[in-house]
Image (cartoon, rainbow, N blue to C red):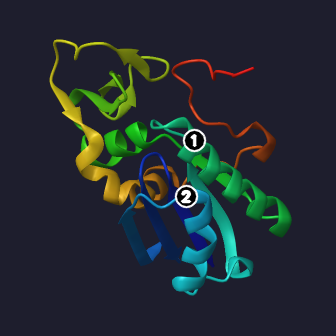
Amino acid sequence: MLILSLDTSSSSISLSLFENNRVVLNFYKKTSEKTLRLLPSLFSYLDINPKSIAAFYVSIGVGYATPLRIGINFIKAMAMSLEKPIYTFVNLDAVAKTMFKDQEIFLYRKVSDAYVGAFYKNAEAISSSPKEYKELPEADAKDIEEYEHMFSYLGYEAFKNSNPVDLFLVEPIYTRPPTRVF
């Protein structure tokens, strides 16, 4: 049974493929190439047959809205067309649950001009959801950027025992309301 996990929260792509709870492929690429153009060709390049995938994991943030939406919609389309379950994860939570499970820490990611983060104690978020901060809070803090090459792997590892979600409700985390240009 193959499981695919994907994170497209920045200008990089983190993709992991698991078989029987063991990683069989880890792929990471920092790129200036458009995510929408890269994802389909990546499946071909890595010889991944979507029909052989039993379930999909996808990051819903924290990160940049456009690449997140593209990655999420790409996975949603495959999950819907193949009638497979979809699972979501927040990369901050994934890092907390796998790398900092016994600590009290503020995990964050620099997004544009803000620090988007949350406080964690023993791998559980103390705050309800990630928030924007203009300056780093006075706390033991860690930028999760150094783990971005592993976000897809950590997302699966942290949430492999979770329940699938309704794919129609899967949306990126917005720390600011989406803007519209008229």
Q: What element carries label 1?
A: helix
Q: In the rendered view, does 159 fall on the left or right side of 172?
A: left
Other residues around mark 2 within 10 Å, as few (<14) / some (14–19) / many (≥20): many
| Image mark for residue 66 | 1
| Closer-to-camera residue (160/178) | 178
Q: In this view, does 18 lie to the left or right of 151?
A: right
Q: Is residue 101 visible?
A: no
Where is residue 12? Give x, y as percent: 40, 56
Q: Horizontally, is 120 left or right of 161 in the view? A: left
Pinpoint residue 122: horizontal percent, then vertical percent: 29, 32
Which quadrant would the C terminus be assigned to in this image? top right
Q: Residues within 10 Å of mark 1 (few under 14, many from 20)?
A: some
Mark pair 1, 2: CA separation: 9 Å
Report the residue marked by disc 2.
Answer: 35
- Answer whether labels 1 and 2 touch (C-beta < 8 Å): yes
Image coordinates for residue 132, horizontal then vertical, percent: 40, 17
Frontmost residue, 111 versus 157: 111
Seen in the image, is 63 located left or right of residue 96?
right
Residue type, numbered disc 1: Thr
* Element type where label 2 sits in the image: helix
Residue occupying the point 49% across, 18% down: 128
The amino acid type, in three-letter code, at marker 2 is Thr
**Compared with residue 141, is residue 75 higher up or lower down, i.e. above or below?**
below
